[in-house]
Amino acid sequence: MRKLKVFLGFLLLLLLGPWIYIQLVPDRSGLIDPPAIPALPGGYRIYVADWGYHTSIILPQPAGLVRGPSNDSTATYVEFAWGDRRFYMQSNYLPHSLFATVFLPTESVIYLRGWARPPTVADGMRTLWSRLVTAAELAQLHGAVESTMQRDSSNARPAAFAPVDGYGGRFYPARGAYLFWNDCNWWTVDRLHLAGLAEGGGGVILSGQVGARLTGFRVE
């Protein structure tokens, strides 16, 4: 009986510990004000890509914005994605690393990649959604995704990590702990929700759940 109580206590700690950590540890990153974006007749088209198990947001970057990765800062479009540093950036699939990724609060990164043109399904994603937004909505969304990046005392971006084989963009230190209920697909919906472009991200874990939360998007 004693061993059973110890086991149940450990299991409860395993399940509740990450949640308690996220509630108690403050987020040290400042929010980013939306950039000034000029109105465009007809609006701007934004994209959400489902890459199979992982989703990302691809935004147009009007002239004058410099929010792309360090190797393509003025790209016409910028892709933003968030995830666990070891699994996503370092491709560390060892058992202990996978366990930590799923069950423990782990360090996160945000990935930025420049695009010279709008994405299409021919680029390899499983599903591609798009919708038109106003300049104000696009500015709000740029601010929401940019706010995920860690900041220094002057609210400036941190330096990018060294280039990673297989990725054309750059990874940056991100805010927020990664857990199975706070994963890349939850992040995608949550950022869109902050801009009024999706329902809340609560309960979203798999990429296949993202589409049902989007507001006003179409499948390309």
Image: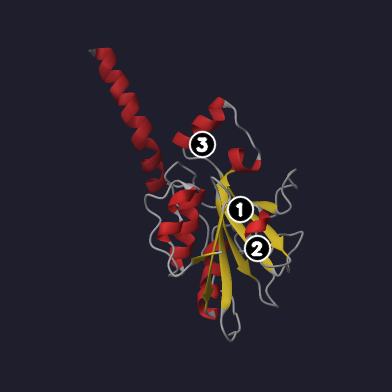
Q: Closer to the camera, 156 or 53? A: 53
Q: CA distance from mark 2 to mark 1?
A: 9 Å
Mark 2 touching mark 3, by CB under 8 A? no
Q: Nearer the viewer, mark 2 or mark 3?
A: 2
Tell me the amino acid under the disc marked 1.
Met
Q: Secondary structure at mark 2?
A: loop
Task: Tell me where residue 201 appears, x and y as whole percent.
Answer: 41, 56
**At x 54% / y 26%, what residue is drawn?**
96
Q: Nearer the viewer, mark 1 or mark 3?
A: 1
Name the quarter where the N terminus is drawn: top left
Mark 2 touching mark 1, by CB under 8 A? yes
Q: In the figure, 151 relative to 66: above or below? A: above
Q: In the figure, 142 relative to 186: above or below? A: below
Residue 166 visible in this rendered orientation of the protein: yes
Q: Quadrant of residue 58?
A: bottom right
**At x 45% / y 41%, what residue is drawn?**
180
Q: Closer to the camera, 55 or 29? A: 55
Q: In the figure, 94 relative to 21: above or below? A: above
* Count of numbered labels shown in the rendering: 3
Tell me the amino acid under the disc marked 2.
Pro
Q: Closer to the camera, 40 or 6? A: 40
- Can you identify the residue that label 3 sits on? 101
Of pointers 1 and 3, the one earlier in the residue sequence: 3
**At x 66% / y 72%, what residue is drawn?**
61
Q: Identify the mark at residue 119; answer none if there is no mark.
A: 2
Of pointers 2 and 1, the one earlier in the residue sequence: 2
Q: Quadrant of residue 89?
A: top right
**At x 64% / y 62%, what residue is drawn?**
120
Q: Is residue 182 left or right of residue 66?
A: left
Residue 158 visible in this rendered orientation of the protein: no
Q: CA distance from mark 1 to mark 3?
A: 24 Å
